[in-house]
Image: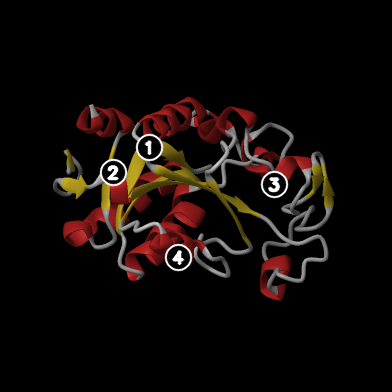
Amino acid sequence: MISINANPYTYQCDPRHTALVVIDMQRDFIEEGGFGSVLGNDVRPLAEIVPTVAALLALARSQELLVVHTRESHLPDLADCPPAKLRRGNPTLGIGDNGPMGRILVRGEVGNQILPLLAPLAGELVIDKPGKGAFYATDLHQQLQQRGISHLLFAGVTTEVCVQTSMREANDRGYECLIVADACASYFPVFHQATLAMLTAQGGIVGWQAPLATVQAAFA
């Protein structure tokens, strides 16, 4: 067992039953000129965590943890996109529209791909999710159960939307979850901090949090 000096108390996991879930580290959300910046967001807080996520991926691979990557994405005909999601926010560019890196949030488009530095390796799971959460309308739960996974480490973007939603979904399905705090980010830093506080409140109501250095020290 690995013991991580986490908040609100020690998080323990068996690497044989632990997976790293990296949420939506996609070009459209993180790169200048992508969908995120077109919407008026400052993408720099997201770009800044890329080296940390890369180091976390390297750790997971060295420890032979199962690695899961997610992409928020839709079929080309948008048949899997709820109408309310299409209407939300009244953006200048919406889901399915042509953006700087191809059609927005559509599978196979350039902007929908995971950053090259964080690209999945052969054998790692890639989950295309039509919603905010990694478990909604996907087979992620079945894939994890088949592999005997009971504990999940979370990283990615954005902390308060897709990462938090996925971690809450996982908690409801019985997984023990830890968010690697500095391997996640938001366009709004105050939302990042608030989400970390919410997830770990009341004795870890959703799960635990710890920085990468603490996780590395535990596995070392």
Give the class, few, some or many, for how many residues have Cα within 10 Å of label 4's Cα (few <14, many ≥20). some
Q: Which residue, given by chain and number where applicable, does mark 1 sit on?
A: 64
User: Which marked residue is nearer to the observer: mark 1 or mark 4?
Assistant: 1
Label 2 is placed on what type of residue?
Pro
| Mark 1 vs 4: CB contact within 8 A | no
Percent of width and height locating residue 124:
52, 44
Instruction: Please tell me whether residue 23 is drawn above or below residue 164 in the rendered image.
Output: above
- Is residue 83 visible to us here? yes
Q: Secondary structure at mark 3?
A: loop
Coordinates of residue 139 in the picture (x, y in percent): 53, 65
State the SS at label 4.
helix
In terms of secondary structure, where does tag 2 sit? helix
Residue 184: quadrant of the picture: top left
Q: Give the mark nearer the N terminus: 3 vs 1.
A: 3
Residue 153 visible (yes or no)? no
Amino acid type, residue under disc 3 in the picture: Leu
* Residue in view at x 70 percent, y 46 percent: 39
Q: Which residue does the image show at 66% across and 33% down from the upper left?
A: 31
Which badge, 4 or 2, is on the more N-terminal residue? 2
- Residue 189, above or below 172: above
Q: Is residue 18 above or below residue 148?
A: above
Instruction: First in sequence, mark 4 or 3: give its number.
Output: 3
Identify which amino acid the numbered label 4 is placed on: His
Q: How many marks?
A: 4
Marks 4 and 2 close (CB-CB < 8 Å): no
Residue 145, quarter of the rendered image: bottom left
Dot 1 falls on a residue whose secondary structure is loop
Q: From mark 4 to mark 2, how far is it between C-alphas?
A: 18 Å
Residue 207 position by quadrant: bottom left
